[in-house]
């Protein structure tokens, strides 16, 4: 199937946004006063955008604000707000997600949609373009749209050719009359082409490609091929396409919360059947609610393991709804609901073990999923072992809901927990002091274990000691000045176990070694 792209251009986006927000006309200004947006460019206040009325009066971008006011005294000028314009464009991209999951920005002030395989759901390409046009006009946004076989062709047609729908394979015939400015080359390149008598895409298409590349660079030839439909460069969508998508569109906006919950339950069941046919399970389930006023609300639930259990996913979804600080507001109703599974992993049929450990593991995993849904993924953590001998760095906290696909991308320092020897005491204490606490210790021999030490004004007589375990510093992290440590596991006469270490050695002319308590065994 040939690729099809829909380009939308909003030529008056900043001024349309100001009118949508009710910021014009200003008090005392006539209702039909031309509106411009200005910013500081090259040490002067210059126009960066004009509305349709200002353009019809001869104002253009890059004109100084003083010249514009001299020409039109009733001019209404507002300082540019590029962040607000970008936010509006982002909301428009989210709105267009109801038509196709492949939506990208087409700067400046434009969107690019990959509608391959989607147009027939709306009655065809012309009907889809008309439907989007009705939405945009209802929102007070002037726009121009075009559909073609490559993003560059649709872009050029929407901004330089008046828009429309180009049948597959007819891009070159439709775009040949366009000016070379449609390639959006550097200004000096456009001037050089005009001086050479090459003013349209047809003039360039009649020249050998290698000649154009040798004179103006390979970029010109590449842009020409893509604009004329001979080469397709896929777009990079704002949101990666999910592995599984199911959705419902409503003939009339839905306001009933119970009916909406029933729709979500059916979508979850449908997604579970699709995943079962693929032999996969989902790790994240995102429900998108598309309101009739263009707003989009997305809610996500995550699982600690691949799952396609519709009942369990539905319980997590209800838990997520109950914990919302900002309740789901239908506004004037929802037009569509989409369930996407962005992360999928292989999931085969499982067989319960005879010792019921599998049942216990499932119960723990379900508990983790509910806690993550209620409190957030950053508040439910688990520990993973680090490939290091440094006691403080031996474990790292990470989200309990992190998918295995993301865990695989973690640094190579992540390793498996060490397995203790049977009937042997633990080699590391459960409680560590950070920083280690200094103690006064007395050793029988200079480099031997302590026989007595004082900690928190209490004297402990050592009954048993094991060591030393020498841990060298990680010079690539701590530098070469960090001293080595000799660790000892000791037990006092009352049976309490401590983890001590010594820094330094007994050497003539050097300071005596120091002792520290680093942890307590249970």
Image (tube, rainbow, N blue to C red):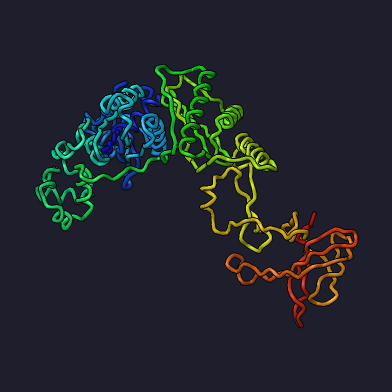
Residue 422 on image: x %, y %: 75, 59
> In the visual, does 331 lie left or right of 479?
left
Q: The N terminus appears in which quarter of the rendering?
A: top left
Of residue 31 and residue 74, the one placed in the foreground of this image is 31
Residue 258 on image: x %, y %: 54, 18
> In the visual, does 456 lie left or right of 33?
right
> In the visual, does 376 lie left or right of 247?
right
Of residue 424 and residue 216, the one placed in the foreground of this image is 424
**Looking at the image, residue 295 lies above or below residue 221:** above
Q: Quadrant of residue 199?
A: top left
> In the visual, does 205 lie left or right of 124?
left
Residue 336 on image: x %, y %: 43, 24
Q: How many marks?
A: 0
Q: Is residue 373 visible?
A: yes
Q: The C terminus appears in which quarter of the rendering?
A: bottom right
Q: Residue at x 63, y 41 (%)?
A: 379
Of residue 295 and residue 402, the one placed in the foreground of this image is 402
Q: Is residue 332 visible?
A: no
Q: Residue at x 46, y 18 (%)?
A: 254
**Looking at the image, residue 458 lies above or below residue 481:** above
Of residue 322 and residue 458, the one placed in the foreground of this image is 322
Residue 360 on image: x %, y %: 68, 40
Which residue, as the protein is rendered here, is positioned at the far bottom? 508
């Amino acid at each position: 199937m040939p690729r099809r792209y829909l380009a939308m251009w909003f030529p008056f986006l900043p001024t349309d946004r100001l009118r949508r927000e009710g910021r014009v006309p200003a008090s005392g200004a006539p209702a039909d006063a031309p509106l411009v947006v200005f910013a500081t460019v090259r040490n002067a206040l210059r126009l960066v955008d004009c509305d349709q009325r200002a353009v019809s009066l001869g104002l253009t971008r890059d004109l100084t604000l003083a010249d514009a006011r001299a020409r039109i005294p009733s001019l209404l000028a507002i300082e540019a707000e590029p962040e607000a314009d970008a936010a509006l464009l982002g909301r428009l991209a989210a709105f267009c997600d109801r038509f196709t999951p492949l939506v990208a920005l087409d700067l400046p002030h434009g969107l690019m949609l990959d509608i391959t395989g989607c147009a027939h759901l709306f009655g065809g390409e012309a009907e889809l373009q008309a439907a989007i046009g009705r939405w945009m006009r209802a929102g007070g946004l002037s726009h121009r749209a075009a559909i073609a076989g490559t993003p560059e062709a649709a872009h050029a047609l929407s901004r330089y050719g008046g828009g429309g729908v180009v049948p597959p394979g007819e891009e070159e015939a439709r775009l040949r009359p366009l000016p070379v400015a449609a390639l959006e080359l550097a200004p000096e390149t456009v001037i050089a082409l005009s001086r050479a008598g090459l003013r349209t895409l047809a003039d360039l298409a009649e020249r050998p490609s290698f000649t154009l590349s040798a004179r103006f660079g390979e970029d010109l030839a590449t842009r020409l091929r893509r604009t004329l439909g001979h080469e397709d460069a896929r777009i990079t969508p704002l949101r990666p396409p999910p592995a599984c998508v199911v959705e419902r569109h409503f003939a009339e906006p839905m306001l009933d919360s119970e009916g909406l919950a029933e729709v979500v339950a059916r979508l979850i069941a449908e997604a579970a059947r699709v995943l079962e046919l693929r032999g996969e399970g989902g790790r994240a389930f995102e429900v998108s609610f598309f309101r009739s006023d263009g707003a989009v609300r997305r809610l996500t639930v995550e699982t600690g393991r691949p799952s396609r259990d519709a009942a369990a996913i539905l319980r997590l979804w209800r838990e997520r709804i109950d914990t919302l600080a900002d309740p789901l507001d239908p506004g004037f109703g929802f037009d569509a609901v989409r369930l996407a599974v962005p992360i999928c992993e292989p999931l085969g049929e499982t067989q319960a073990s005879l010792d019921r450990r599998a049942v216990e593991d499932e119960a723990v995993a379900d508990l983790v999923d509910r806690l993550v849904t209620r409190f957030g993924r950053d508040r439910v953590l688990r520990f993973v072992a680090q490939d290091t001998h440094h006691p403080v760095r031996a474990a790292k906290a990470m989200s309990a809901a992190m998918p295995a696909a993301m865990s695989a991308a973690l640094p190579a320092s992540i390793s498996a927990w060490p397995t203790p020897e049977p009937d042997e005491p633990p080699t590391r204490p459960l409680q560590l002091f950070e920083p280690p606490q200094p103690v006064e210790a007395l050793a029988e021999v200079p480099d031997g274990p302590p026989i007595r030490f004082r900690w928190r004004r209490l004297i402990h007589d050592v009954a048993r000691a094991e060591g030393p375990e020498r841990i060298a510093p990680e010079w690539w992290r701590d530098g070469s000045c960090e001293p080595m440590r000799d660790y000892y596991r000791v037990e006092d006469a009352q049976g309490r176990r401590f983890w001590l270490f010594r820094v330094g050695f007994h050497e003539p002319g050097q300071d005596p070694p120091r002792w520290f308590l680093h942890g307590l065994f249970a």
